[in-house]
Amino acid sequence: MHIQQKEDKTTEGLVAVINKLLIIIVVLVITIFIIPFVLFYKSQPQKTEGQAAKITGSAETVKTDATVYWSAPDVNAIADAKQKEQVEYGRELIAHTAKYLGPNGSVLKMSNGLNCQNCHLQAGTAVWGNNYGSVASTYPKFRARSGQVEDVYKRVNDCFERSLNGRALNKNSKEMQAIVSYINFVGSNVEKGKKAAGSGFKDLAYLDRAASPENGRLLFTTKCQSCHQANGEGVFNADKTEYTYPALWGKQSYNDGAGLFRLSNFAKYIKNNMPQGATYQNPQLSDEEAWDIAAFVNTQPRPHLNTSGDWPDKSKKSVDNPVGPYTDNFTELQHKYGPFKPIEEEKKKKEELAKQKQTIANK
Ligand code: HEC
Ligand code: HEC
């Protein structure tokens, strides 16, 4: 009886050990099969418009991003040596603006230290990176902000005065001539009046709620702070000629009259381009994250610009223009953080009405 029990216990013990071993083996087998599987899928680029076209196309109709989206012509193809030199200087000024025109600029000290390229990525040639593809083909054009027909010079100076919180550059200066010559060259392969596919910003859906600066603050610390710093002031390079990580707020950043001060522009820019390394093909922020971070950054202190002369027709203001007065009854707060859909719907209705009145008046 006694011995029998002992034997039972030993078998029980053995069974338990075998069971444990089996579990370990199963777990090992699962890991061995799953790890390569996960790695394989992670290494696959995410599906995008370009890629989707590639997958569905037959051999002849295969579309790559290069055929879906505009790309800049090659500067080396310019035959005229003088023109090539000018265009190359223009590209250099876009890429390293601060070296020449920043606080320690070698030509003029007239801007805040940002490079045009910080916001117009790859010298204004990156797909959905706020590129210059459509500038040559669409300017001069009427812009509701100034209420004027603007040429490329005026538009460039807008960014100098607002995004670079600086002064306007003389139209006849060597630098302005080079910048405009470069921008015109970049868009020289786009038909007049047409827009280059992938130029400017990619559209981003509005949220149904107001964007949250509080939520954005948390996201900023985990996703942006390592480069742009806790105080948002970025990091200059060793010889202080230009930023390694540009300022997002503070004295050396864009002012409150700049394009990025509009929530939608900021959210669209970071959605497809930030944190550094993100692209439209491989975005790293959800839509909500992009809007909330935009709300946080654009709530931080920055230089002020008197923009009272902007928008001579106030009804044309963009829905996310954060500075009143407005022609609707939505608050300044809602114009800054949203929700924007109700504002947009009302604006569209009013425009529709105005059109109808116009056609009746013309009859
Ligand atoms: C802080 C970010 C920032 C910097 C720096 C910046 N820009 Fe811009 N720029 C913008 C934004 C945002 C827009 C689009 C604004 C909009 O559509 O409301 C824009 C638009 C433009 C446009 C018009 C593009 C189009 O398709 O209509 C030109 C040209 C331009 N910038 C030139 C420059 C030049 C030249 C510099 C450097 C001197 C510069 N920008 C620096 C943010 C910036
Ligand atoms: C790994 C470093 C890194 C991280 C992380 C990063 N950025 Fe940037 N950011 C850069 C660099 C570098 C540039 C300038 C790009 C260029 O010149 O090509 C830049 C440019 C910008 C600009 C335009 C220039 C300016 O100063 O206004 C904005 C806006 C911006 N980043 C926002 C963000 C936000 C928001 C996050 C977090 C979601 C973020 N970045 C995360 C490195 C980083």
Image (tube, grey):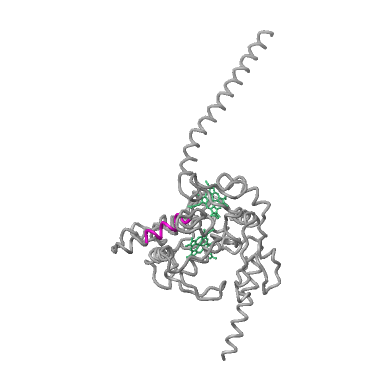
Is 357 located above or below residue 19 in the figure?
A: below
In this orientation, does residue 38 appear?
A: yes
Residue positioned 31% across, 63% down in the render: 82
In the rendered image, residue 35 lying in the magenta stretch gets the answer no
Q: Nearer the viewer, residue 302 or 12?
A: 302
- Quick one: which residue is furthest to the left in this view? 79
Residue 359: x and y, percent?
Answer: 57, 86
Our reading of the magenta stretch's main secondary structure is helix
**Picture coordinates of residue 34, whole percent (x, y):** 50, 37
Residue at the image position 40 percent from the left and 72 percent from the top = 192
Verify whether residue 94 appears in magenta.
Answer: yes
* Camera sees residue 126: no
User: Would you say 253 lies left or right of 65 here?
Assistant: right
Magenta residues (range): 87-97
Q: Position of residue 309 (x, y in %)?
A: 61, 72
On the image, the x and y values in percent for residue 290 come to: 59, 55
